[in-house]
Amino acid sequence: MAFQAEVGTWLAAHLLARMPVGGRFGLANTALPVCIQLETGDGLDDIRLDQDDSSRIELQSKTSAGLTTDPNSPLGKTLRQLVRIVMDARGTGIAVDPMKTRAILAVAANAPRSLDALERGCRAFDLGGSWATTKAGRSSAERDALDIFETHARSAWVTHSVTSPTDDELVMMARLFRIERFSMNEGEVNWREASRLLGARLYGAEASGDAPLRELKDIIRGMIGSCQRRRDFRPVWRSKSRPVAGRMRRHEKGPDRAPFHAGGEKIFGAYVGAISPVSGSTISSAGLSWAPAMVGLRRRVDWIRR
């Protein structure tokens, strides 16, 4: 859960700062993130990020992973979830658009470097090409990694279909799939980036971001833990004690802010969603008005229940 919270915190900082993240994951770097869902129960179910151009990024977070054919390994489980995304879309009659969707295996910066061979092999398909021909033209390490990818994809596929995946479907899954390394321990490169961004965009100075980023990480961790504990039922959750904006408000400076307005179970306070244990927790920027000169989080949080 700790690493999942770190990845979620990096994404949430960009959502709060209204800064794009798509370029890091091979999507257009113009769309803005608008909603983060945690513990979704669908697809790569650790984190889902929706953007304002209808694209989405689904992430499975594993501190470490390796190239192995074990179906219960982190890589095997993640590719099984990727196959489910493709098969669920096929069931609706709408193909997954590789220009609008990414399936990310998020790993720590010190995860085995053997994963890099799989990442390079998958990126070879970004401009198309056939599975067999493109794979044959890669290095020995990349061919071996793509063989492992194919083994997992075919094994998972047959649990959903009586037919095997076509070469085109293997290519499409390779295009959707990416391996991204995150370094979100305090002081590491992704932490420093998120801290500077949060400080500059919301608190008036790059140097002011560390304290609110720590609070944001605690919030994300708490939301994940609540979802995991309450997954099987949906309580009424309207606690007004120390809401998110209240926790982060201590760091803000500047003139009075207008209140946030939050609707239903999905949105509250400083973009942070109330717990919805069946569908997961959500962080969203929907429905919030922004003033051009806004600095910091707003002073008051209004809770509105549907």
Image (cartoon, helix red, strand yellow):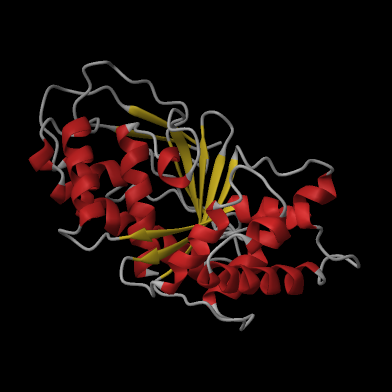
261 with respect to 152 (left or right): left
Within the image, what quadrant is residue 160 found in?
A: bottom right
Q: Is residue 243 above or below residue 257?
A: below
Q: Is residue 99 above or below residue 136?
A: above
Within the image, what quadrant is residue 17 found in?
A: top left
Q: Residue furthest front?
A: 137
Residue 71 at x, y = what percent? 64, 80
**Residue placed most toward the observer, 300 or 147:** 147
Residue 3 at x, y = what percent? 36, 66
Q: Quadrant of the N terminus?
A: bottom left
182 with respect to 177 (left or right): left
Q: Is residue 255 above or below residue 244?
A: above
Q: Residue furthest top?
A: 292
169 with respect to 258 (left or right): right
Within the image, what quadrant is residue 234 found in?
A: bottom right
Residue 125 at x, y = what percent? 61, 50
The structure residue drawn at horizontal position 23% and vertical position 22%, both measured from the top left corner, is: 294
Q: Quadrant of the C terminus?
A: top right
Residue 179 visible somewhere in the drawing: yes
Residue 270 visible somewhere in the drawing: no
**Residue placed most toward the observer, 170 or 35:** 170
The structure residue drawn at horizontal position 24% and vertical position 33%, both measured from the top left corner, is: 297
The structure residue drawn at horizontal position 68% and vertical position 69%, both measured from the top left corner, is: 150
Q: Residue furthest bottom?
A: 70
- Total marks shown come to 0
Residue 89 at x, y = what percent? 76, 48
The structure residue drawn at horizontal position 33% and vertical position 37%, both measured from the top left corner, is: 16
179 with respect to 164 (left or right): left
